[in-house]
Amino acid sequence: MPMTAAKTKKVGLAALLSLVLPGLGQLYVGDRRKGVGLIVVTIVLGLILIALDLGFTLIIYWIYSVVDAYQTAKRYNTYLLRNGRPPW
């Protein structure tokens, strides 16, 4: 097994951070592109949906972000442990 200075990420913490704000969990894992993208989409989508009085549909997007942060952290950890370096 390769040695690495990078540490595995806590999948629960990644999910919790994305529960606070979609994209934060992805940023925690190190996937900056996805994290920033989700934050921008959350703000824009949130403003549009609230303006259209469809704010409740934002919950579906929010849940997607939490699940994706969890899965991204799992993929990160698997890659790190197999290859000895972070995937990004």
Image (cartoon, rainbow, N blue to C red):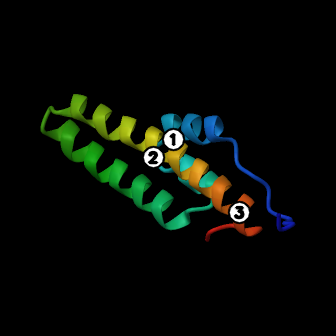
Query: Is 86 placed above or below 9 here?
Result: below
Q: Residues within 10 Å of mark 2 (few under 14, many from 20)?
A: some
* Sequence-first tag of 2 and 3: 2
Query: Which disc is residue 68 wearing?
Result: 2
Between residues 28 and 73, which one lies in front from this camera angle?
Answer: 73
Q: Amino acid at mark 1?
A: Ser
Residue topped by disc 3: 82
Nearest-to-viewer mark from 2 and 3: 3
Q: Amino acid at mark 2?
A: Asp
Residue sitting at x 77%, y 68%: 84
Residue sitting at x 42%, y 44%: 65
Q: Quadrant of the C terminus?
A: bottom right
Query: Is 77 placed above or below 85 here?
Result: above
Q: Residues within 10 Å of mark 1 (few under 14, many from 20)?
A: many
- The quarter of the picture where residue 76 lies is bottom right
- In this rendering, would 41 be left or right of 1? left
Query: Is 19 placed above or below 79 here?
Result: above
Residue sitting at x 62%, y 68%: 87
Q: Residue furthest front?
A: 1
Residue 16, how many percent across, how many down? 57, 34
Residue 39, how many percent across, how many down? 43, 53
- In this rendering, would 79 be left or right of 81? left
Instruction: Determine contact: label 2, label 1, CB under 8 Å.
Output: yes
Residue topped by disc 1: 18
Q: Quadrant of the N terminus?
A: bottom right
Disc 1 is placed on an element classified as helix
The alpha-carbon separation of the residues under discs 2 and 3 comes to: 21 Å
Query: Which disc is residue 69 wearing?
Result: none
* Sequence-first tag of 2 and 1: 1
Residue sitting at x 69%, y 42%: 10
Disc 2 is placed on an element classified as helix
